[in-house]
């Protein structure tokens, strides 16, 4: 079948079905076969893989996935696209189309049923309005996935890949780096989509670890600490964490714990590595337990 990911073929399908783009669903269809090839290279799909595609649109990327994977599950929220997908994917017998909101679907259950619980791969040109809830839902929800290869807003890809000291470094970088190893595989300009988005895009690959990168006593406590530290990123960590309503530490508790880790009481959150946040979280909890 000729590739749908060419502008002329996408336009033909849109006209044939009288399809109206829904802005609220973040519908920007990818119309560049070179970019599709780059996404496939980054995802490294084999016939043994079960791939979950989030938001197949008219099925342009799904065609590529069906050619390479053992099985593809494509989850699309827009019911108007289901008849289109039924036609564009009719030649493939390894695809299941689900008309559902990805944020409401139980992916652990789906992978258990479709892949015996073995890790799947996620590949998608994501709807940008829900990038963070999708990625964090997969990672924090411990959904069995070995790799996530997704097109996201360039700025978000930079934040995911950022390290300490960079302006892009923050709670998202730390969460993504805790669960996975991120790598930007390609930058993609707006003219590769119909309609063109107002922002640049990038393909990012997250290689998900079997176990998180660092050991920490209480994961939830560490992430509360991280969120508090970046909530007011211009403040020192001591000031922003002591002011956080989600935690109950005084300035004194925090400076003492920082000093015990050979860090200054005036340090900002953006200077700490993931390992240091884990140590600080453990230290604050052990100091508190010693007081009890
Ligand atoms: N994969 C297609 C492509 O590359 O051309 C379309 C990508 S488009 C950026 C995002 C797709 O996600 C749209 O088809 C949109 O309808 C769908 N979508 C938006 N929100 C969704 C949700 N909550 N659950 C599932 N699909 C969603």
Image: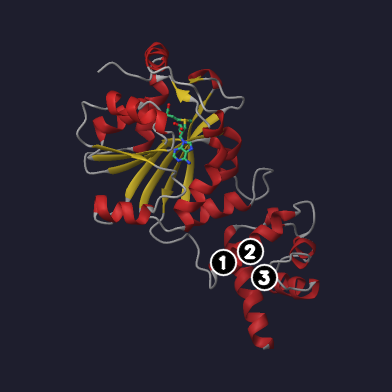
Q: Mark 1 or mark 3: which is in front?
A: 1
Using residue 150 as the reference point, say whether residue 174 is left or right of it: right
Q: CA distance from mark 1 to mark 2?
A: 6 Å
Q: Mark 3 or mark 2: which is in front?
A: 2
Q: Residues within 10 Å of mark 2 (few under 14, many from 20)?
A: some
| Disc 1 to disc 2: CB gap under 8 Å | yes
Q: Which quadrant holds the C terminus?
A: bottom right
- Name the residue: 62% across, 70% down: 281
Q: Earlier in the sequence, mark 3 or mark 2?
A: 2
In the picture shown, does residue 208 fall above or below 128? below
Q: Quadrant of residue 52?
A: top left
- Which residue is nearer to you in this view: 108 or 251? 108
Q: Which mark is residue 24?
A: none
Q: What residue does disc 2 label?
A: 224
Image coords of residue 1 (percent x, y): 24, 18
In the picture shown, does residue 125 fall above or below 230? above
Q: CA distance from mark 3 to mark 2?
A: 19 Å
| Disc 1 to disc 3: CB gap under 8 Å | no
> Helix, strand or loop at disc 2?
helix
- Which residue is nearer to you in this view: 100 or 176? 100
| Disc 3 to disc 2: CB gap under 8 Å | no
- Name the residue: 50% across, 26% down: 28
Where ligand 1 lies, by image quadrant?
Answer: top left
Image coords of residue 42 (percent x, y): 38, 35
Q: What residue does disc 3 label?
A: 261
Using residue 171 as the reference point, say whether residue 89 is left or right of it: left
Q: What residue does disc 1 label?
A: 220
The reply to whether the residue tagged 2 has its Cβ within 8 angstroms of ligand 1 is no
């Amino acid at each position: 079948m000729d590739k749908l990911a060419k502008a002329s073929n996408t336009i033909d399908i849109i006209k044939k079905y009288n399809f109206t783009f829904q802005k609220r669903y973040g519908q920007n269809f990818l119309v560049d076969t070179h970019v599709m090839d780059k996404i496939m290279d980054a995802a490294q799909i084999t016939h043994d893989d079960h791939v979950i595609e989030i938001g197949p649109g008219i099925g342009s990327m799904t065609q590529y996935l069906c050619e390479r994977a053992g099985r593809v599950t494509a989850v699309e929220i827009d019911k108007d696209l289901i008849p289109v997908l039924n036609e564009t994917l009719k030649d493939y017998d390894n695809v299941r189309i689900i008309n559902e909101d990805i944020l409401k679907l139980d992916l652990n259950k789906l992978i258990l049923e479709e892949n015996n619980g073995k890790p799947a791969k996620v590949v998608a040109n994501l709807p940008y309005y829900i990038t963070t809830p999708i990625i964090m839902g997969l990672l924090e929800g411990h959904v069995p996935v070995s790799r996530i290869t997704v097109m996201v807003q360039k700025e978000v890809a930079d934040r995911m890949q950022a390290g300490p000291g960079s302006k892009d470094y923050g709670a998202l970088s730390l969460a993504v780096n805790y669960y996975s190893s991120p790598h930007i595989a390609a930058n993609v300009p707006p003219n590769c989509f119909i309609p063109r988005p107002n922002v640049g895009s990038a393909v990012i690959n997250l290689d998900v670890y079997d176990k998180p990168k660092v050991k920490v006593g209480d994961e939830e406590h560490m992430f509360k600490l991280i969120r508090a530290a970046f909530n007011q990123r211009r403040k020192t960590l001591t000031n922003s964490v002591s002011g956080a309503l989600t935690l109950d530490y005084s300035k004194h508790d925090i400076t003492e714990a920082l000093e015990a880790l050979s860090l200054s009481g005036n340090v900002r959150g953006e200077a700490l590595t993931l390992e240091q946040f884990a140590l600080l979280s453990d230290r604050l909890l052990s100091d508190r337990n010693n007081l009890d």
